[in-house]
Amino acid sequence: MLKPLSSVLVAATILVASINNPSDTLARTCASKCGSHPIQFTPGQHIRVEVINSTPNMIKIQKPSGTDAISLNPGQKLNLGQIEGTEPNTSLIFWSETGLSLQAIVSKLNFGTLRLELRPTWRSPGDRSLYIMDDGRINVF
């Protein structure tokens, strides 16, 4: 009689402990803590870049390896030509003419289109460039 009673007490203790500390006893998937997956394209893929100025000021955007700065008025959308995914680590730099800190919101619209939306932010210095790495990953700095 003593063995079954002690087994019941041990089981009840474990049950009560798991109810009081559910985060310690429940297994979780990556989806519960990992956040969203990073944006990535197939290496070597041609990527169209759509830039949207969602700030109240003029923004300048430039591909350092070969273009002059392009002005983008408030609310304006610009479709840049295709960027070759095999170029070694292509980048776009952007800045506000008034020194406003910018936040870059990137999203993958479809198989070959990357959207870069520029918004004002209180963070200093803010985001300043979009980096398309030759392995297809997208980074914002």
Image: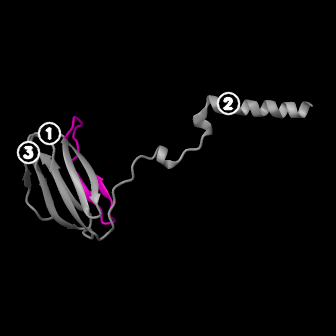
Label 3 sits on a secondary structure element that is loop
| 96 within the magenta span | no
Question: Would residue 141 be seen by someone viewing this image from the given angle?
Answer: no
The alpha-carbon separation of the residues under discs 1 and 2 comes to 53 Å
Residue stretch rendered in magenta on the structure = 120-140
Q: Name the residue beneath numbered marker 2.
A: 17
- Which residue sits furthest right? 1
Q: Residues within 10 Å of mark 1 (few under 14, many from 20)?
A: many
Q: Name the residue beneath numbered marker 1.
A: 100
Q: Which amino acid does label 3 sit on?
A: Met
Label 1 sits on a secondary structure element that is loop
**Along the horizontal axis of the image, is 66 left or right of 48?**
left
Label 2 sits on a secondary structure element that is helix
Quarter of the view holding residue 10: top right
Can you give x and y, in whole percent of width and height, for residue 92 in the image?
19, 57
Q: Name the residue beneath numbered marker 3.
A: 58
Q: Which residue is drawn at 14% across and 41% down?
A: 55
